[in-house]
Image (cartoon, grey):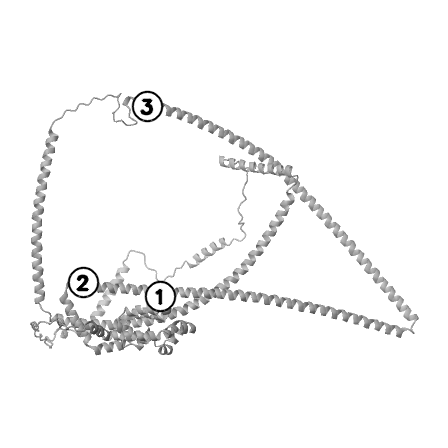
């Protein structure tokens, strides 16, 4: 729209911005969906001179490709711009040019003249009455107001006589007077404080309690720094015979219910053992082991979930950062567009304000020279209408007063008749029989005697019911108390049995712990003795081997001494054995090194494969996540754009509704005061006559 207004500034108006915006949307985004015939209906419903310029600009593919196409590419893809936006434009260019020619002919009046010539052949054209033109009356201009003459202000200074008191004194006399007054004030102050009855000031002495306060503070801090103080709380003194616990009803019932549940559970276990002939201890052991494994597996799952949650949180953080960057970019773009729209709106407001000022000036000029006769005539009409309304109101008031007077007379007559009827005396004799009913035929009719008899019977029955209920409540309380006492006795018996069994269990457990500790100690001692025996056996074996080696060495030395001639051969054999041993050792080390190297390479290759597989899976998940986030961002962006468009459309609709209301109000004002409307139109025609000024303002707006 900015490019359109820049290129077509001489033939379009800023006030038609909304109209051109809607037609542009239909042209570039909905032309293929609507079809050219439906699109033609939208174009023909508007003014021809506005649509000719729009069609000439919108269906010029070469101009669009060189100017606005590059701005569209910033927002949309190149394929979308060329195929979806410019493709239908290029396809319907010929039809649009034909329609534009028809609109030009319609706008210039050629088509209207042709239709008029076809419909009026052979008929004499009747002369038309020229339109009425409002002529301003020549009124007497008011005389200018007389301006009063200015007041003359005197520009002079009046000086009085020179003072004579300066000759009666001098500066030395003033200094002497001042010194005498100061000395007198000093003597008076000294005498005042010398004769005082209060304590004398000791300004030459210095008193300070700093050392005493410092010593007190240090003593207080030293008392607080008592590190050898025992800070433990005194132990709680428990009663020797045990605490007395008073149970209420709820505690008794709760403990009795607990014991009954335990008894029922033990009974079910006994019945199950009698019916199935097996013990469930193994099952419970297996169940405990499986539960521990399940807990371990659940912890592993929790750790795995925690790692995955950390990874997801990191990816979500990165996605949020990307979202923030995209939002910042979108916000900056929207802000730039908003700034551009605000600048355009400011220019429009300036132009409208300039036109309004010009219109106000013209209206003020016309109003200053407006006739007073029209105002007097209007006042005369209002006075006549007021007199007619006043007469009508007076007649209606008189008629209403007559009606009220007649109604008052009728009411007084009725009141008199009622008074006459009420003042006539009548004798009423009523005999009351308590044994008879009122005789109205109701279902529960009864006499006074019957009612009293029934009330007494109901009272006796209520008392009997109350006594019976009291007896039932007393029996229920006694039963409840007896039941509670039985339960308490049962609880005491069970507690006593449980205490005995628990004591025996504790003793058995302590005995088992002592026996187990003794067994462990004995087993440990046995193991220690076995270890000592093994060590002694190894030590004796090693000593025997050492003695055998020493004896062998002794024999070898003796053999060498007896067989010295074979020393060289024995030495060569010895060196051969050493070389063979070194060769075997080197071969063994080489084999071990090759096996370790092969194992290292295999482990490294396996680890590399696992890392590559894990990396590929992570990259795949990351790509899927990024794709999903991108799709979500795209959906949100489209949703944001659609909401912005809906908001703009709603604002435009509100603007159109407001403009329609303004037009309706303006029409009502024109119908109410046609003279002011004529004056306003005349001022508007004068304003529109200044074409050069309007052209300059329009150029400034562009």
From this viewpoint, which residue is outermost toward the front? Answer: 122
Residue sitting nearer the eye, 484 or 159: 484
For marks 3 and 1 on the same chain, the one whose residue lies earlier in the sequence: 3
Residue 179 screen position, x and y as percent? 23, 70
**Element under label 3?**
helix
Q: CA distance from mark 1 to mark 2?
A: 34 Å
Q: Are marks 1 and 2 in contact (CB under 8 Å)?
A: no
Q: CA distance from mark 3 to mark 1?
A: 85 Å
The residue tagged 2 is: 668
Q: CA distance from mark 3 to mark 2?
A: 84 Å
Q: Are marks 3 and 2 in contact (CB under 8 Å)?
A: no
- The answer to whether residue 637 is seen in the rendering is yes
Q: Are marks 3 and 1 in contact (CB under 8 Å)?
A: no
**Element under label 2?**
helix
The answer to whether residue 391 is above or below residue 276 is below
The residue tagged 1 is: 645
Residue 617 screen position, x and y as percent? 56, 65
Could you say which quadrant of the image residue 429 lies in? top left
Screen quadrant of the C terminus: bottom left
Could you say which quadrant of the image residue 417 lies in? top left
Tell me if mark 3 has few (under 14), some (14-19) or many (20+) residues whose alpha carbon lies within 10 angstroms of its own.
Answer: few
Residue sitting nearer the eye, 238 or 273: 273
Tell me if mark 1 has few (under 14), some (14-19) or many (20+) residues whose alpha carbon lies within 10 angstroms of its own.
Answer: few
Foreground label between 3 and 2: 2
Residue sitting nearer the eye, 496 or 213: 496
Tell me the number on the disc at residue 584: none
Residue 377 vs residue 46: left or right?
Answer: left
**Element under label 1?**
helix
The residue tagged 3 is: 454
- The answer to whether residue 4 is seen in the rendering is no
Residue 624 screen position, x and y as percent? 51, 65
């Amino acid at each position: 729209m900015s490019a359109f207004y820049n290129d077509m500034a001489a033939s379009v108006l800023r006030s038609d911005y909304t109209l051109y915006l809607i037609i542009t949307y239909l042209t570039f985004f909905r032309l293929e969906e609507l079809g050219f015939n439906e699109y033609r209906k939208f174009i023909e419903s508007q003014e021809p001179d506005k649509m000719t310029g729009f069609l000439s600009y919108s269906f010029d593919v070469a101009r669009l490709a060189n100017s606005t196409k590059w701005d569209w590419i910033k927002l949309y893809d190149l394929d979308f711009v060329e195929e979806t936006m410019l493709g239908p434009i290029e396809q319907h260019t010929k039809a649009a040019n034909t329609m534009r020619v028809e609109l030009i002919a319609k706008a210039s009046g050629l088509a209207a003249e042709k239709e008029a010539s076809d419909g009026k052949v052979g008929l004499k054209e009747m002369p038309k009455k020229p339109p009425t033109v409002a002529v301003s009356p020549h009124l007497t201009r008011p005389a200018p107001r007389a301006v009063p003459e200015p007041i003359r202000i005197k520009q002079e200074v009046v000086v009085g006589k020179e003072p004579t008191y300066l000759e009666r004194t001098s500066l030395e006399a003033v200094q002497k007077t001042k010194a005498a007054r100061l000395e007198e004030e000093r003597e008076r102050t000294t005498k005042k404080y010398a004769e005082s009855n209060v304590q004398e000031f000791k300004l030459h002495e210095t008193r300070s309690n700093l050392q005493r306060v410092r010593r007190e503070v240090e003593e207080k801090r030293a008392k607080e720094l008592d590190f050898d103080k025992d800070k433990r709380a005194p132990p709680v003194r428990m009663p020797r015979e045990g605490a007395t616990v008073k149970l209420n009803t709820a505690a008794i019932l709760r403990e009795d219910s607990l014991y009954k549940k335990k008894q029922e559970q033990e009974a079910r276990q006994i019945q199950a053992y009698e019916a199935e002939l097996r013990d469930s201890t193994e099952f419970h052991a297996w169940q405990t082991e499986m539960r521990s494994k399940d807990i371990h597996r659940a912890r592993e799952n929790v750790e795995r979930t925690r790692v995955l949650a950390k990874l997801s949180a990191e990816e979500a953080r990165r996605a949020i950062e990307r979202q923030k960057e995209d939002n910042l970019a979108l916000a900056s773009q929207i802000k730039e567009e908003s700034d551009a729209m605000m600048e355009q709106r400011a220019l429009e407001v300036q132009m409208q304000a300039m036109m309004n000022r010009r219109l106000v000036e013209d209206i003020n000029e016309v109003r200053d020279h407006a006739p007073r006769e029209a105002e007097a005539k209007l006042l005369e009409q209002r006075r006549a209408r007021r007199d007619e309304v006043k007469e009508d109101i007076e007649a209606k008031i008189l008629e209403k007063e007559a009606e009220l007077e007649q109604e008052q007379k009728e009411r007084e007559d009725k009141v008199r008749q009622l008074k006459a009827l009420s003042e006539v005396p009548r004798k009423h004799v009523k005999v009351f029989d308590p044994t008879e009913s009122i005789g109205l035929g109701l279902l529960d009719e009864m006499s006074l005697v019957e009612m009293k008899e029934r009330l007494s019977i109901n009272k006796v029955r209520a008392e009997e019911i109350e006594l019976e209920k009291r007896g039932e409540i007393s029996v229920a309380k006694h039963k409840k108390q007896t039941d509670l006492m039985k339960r308490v006795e049962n609880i005491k018996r069970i507690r006593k049995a449980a205490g005995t069994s628990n004591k025996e269990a504790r003793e058995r457990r302590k005995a088992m712990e002592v026996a187990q500790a003794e067994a462990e100690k004995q087993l440990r001692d046995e193991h220690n003795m076995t270890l000592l025996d093994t060590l002694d056996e190894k030590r004796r074996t090693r000593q025997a081997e050492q003695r055998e080696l020493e004896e062998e060495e002794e024999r070898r030395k003796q053999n060498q001494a007896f067989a010295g001639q074979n020393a060289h051969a024995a030495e060569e054999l010895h060196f051969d054995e050493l070389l063979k041993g070194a060769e075997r050792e080197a071969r063994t080390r080489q084999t071990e090194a090759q096996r370790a190297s092969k194992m290292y390479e295999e482990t490294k290759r396996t680890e590399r494969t696992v890392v590559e597989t894990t990396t590929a899976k992570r990259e795949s998940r990351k790509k899927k996540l990024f794709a999903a986030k991108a799709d979500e961002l795209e959906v949100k962006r489209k949703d944001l754009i659609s909401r912005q468009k809906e908001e703009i459309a709603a604002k435009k609709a509100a603007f159109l509704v407001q403009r329609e209301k303004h037009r309706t109000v303006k029409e009502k004002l024109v119908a109410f005061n046609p003279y002011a409307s004529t004056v306003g139109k005349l001022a508007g025609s004068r304003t529109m006559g200044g074409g050069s000024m309007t052209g300059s303002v329009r150029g400034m707006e562009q």
